[in-house]
Image: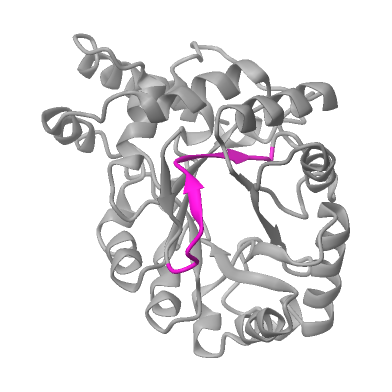
Amino acid sequence: MKYRLLGRTGLRVSEIGFGAWAIGSNWGRQSISDSVEALNKAIDMGLNFIDTALGYGNGKSEQIIAEVLKERREKVIVATKIPPVEGPWPPSPYCSSSDRYPETYIRNAIDTCRKNLDTDSIDILQLHTWTRAWNRNPRPLDILHKLKEEGVIRHIGLSTPEQDQNALIFLMREGYLDTVQLIYNIFEQEPAAELLPVALDKNIGVIVRVALDEGILTGKYKSGHLFPKDDFRSKYFEGDRMPRALHRVELIKKELEHTDFTIAQAALKFVLAHPAVSTVITGIRNKNQATQNMKTTDIPDLPDDLMIKLRGHVWRRGIWYSGK
């Protein structure tokens, strides 16, 4: 396993991290035993960064992680997220930050996370979403800085709103954030224009999510594939998005025909090629997935000519098409 600095936090994190949404909820049937095996296998192979959230199964993901870490001597860094008070997601420009992230709510939510994770201080506390409208008066982040001074949390992060990731650039430049969690993959390359360079310039740790575009960039799905109704991907790939995505995946596979890279390996290596990226959190549901994802860090980097070809597969999925 290779490790990178997580920006100015000074933490050294594994290039491949553990995305713990699926072990909590919303990804179809998932057994606790599979989740525990996946976590243990990943840590055995050198993983030391886990990303979770209070909203993943109403604390279930955090609790499973805490149980596993009780039995481990390794130091594993855990980042978690708290959602805003119930309302539009992502927040509407008309939402008030004081209504969606009031101080009492933030403190209570973090206390719940600490209890779930069985820790006095959270390594990285992230707000789960944001709106550009709050940049004028980012009161919730001021509260987090106060909690950081109190020792309740160690580092402050923010997860980008999907349709306006660049909303965080102002906060990054103004020094509000230690880390950012963003979407970056072969299809979604907009962060390379400004967000990632700003992170590099300001020494902000970058946690990349959705590197495999919710699984489609693994190449394992076929035409006609259907997800269970309790799996959020049934919505993500609804309508004609699945066949459109599969067509693009086949084009990428052709680029890889005379290489030793699988499409999943190429997708992860594409993300890791950017110098601003600290870690890529991959969704891992069992020990076999853990093994395959962890191995990626040890294979050669993508050659420059292949990187250039993969950049050509950017997919500008706009909100004009219902985000699909």
Residue at the bottom extreme of this rendering: 137
Residue 220 seen anywhere in this rendered image of the structure: yes
The residue shown at (49%, 11%) is 222
Q: Which of 264 and 179 is in front in this view?
A: 179
Q: Which of 145 and 76 is in front in this view?
A: 76
Q: Give the x, y percent position of residue 87.
A: 74, 67
Q: Nearer the viewer, residue 114 or 196?
A: 114
Residue 323 seen anywhere in this rendered image of the structure: no
Residue 105 occupies quadrant: bottom right
Q: Is residue 302 left or right of residue 119?
A: left
Q: Which of 308 and 77 is in front in this view?
A: 77
Q: Is residue 306 left or right of residue 32?
A: left
Q: How many labels does the image show?
A: 0
Residue 238 occupies quadrant: top right
Residue at the front extreme of this rendering: 73
The residue shown at (35%, 41%) is 271
The residue shown at (35%, 66%) is 199
Q: Quadrant of the N terminus?
A: top left
Q: Give the range drawn in magenta.
A: 8-21
Q: In this view, does 70 lie above or below 104?
A: above
Q: Is residue 234 left or right of residue 258?
A: right
Q: Give the x, y percent position of residue 138.
A: 57, 85
Q: Give the x, y percent position of residue 251.
A: 27, 19
The residue shown at (78%, 70%) is 85
Q: Give the x, y percent position of residue 39.
A: 69, 31
- Residue 57 in the magenta stretch? The answer is no
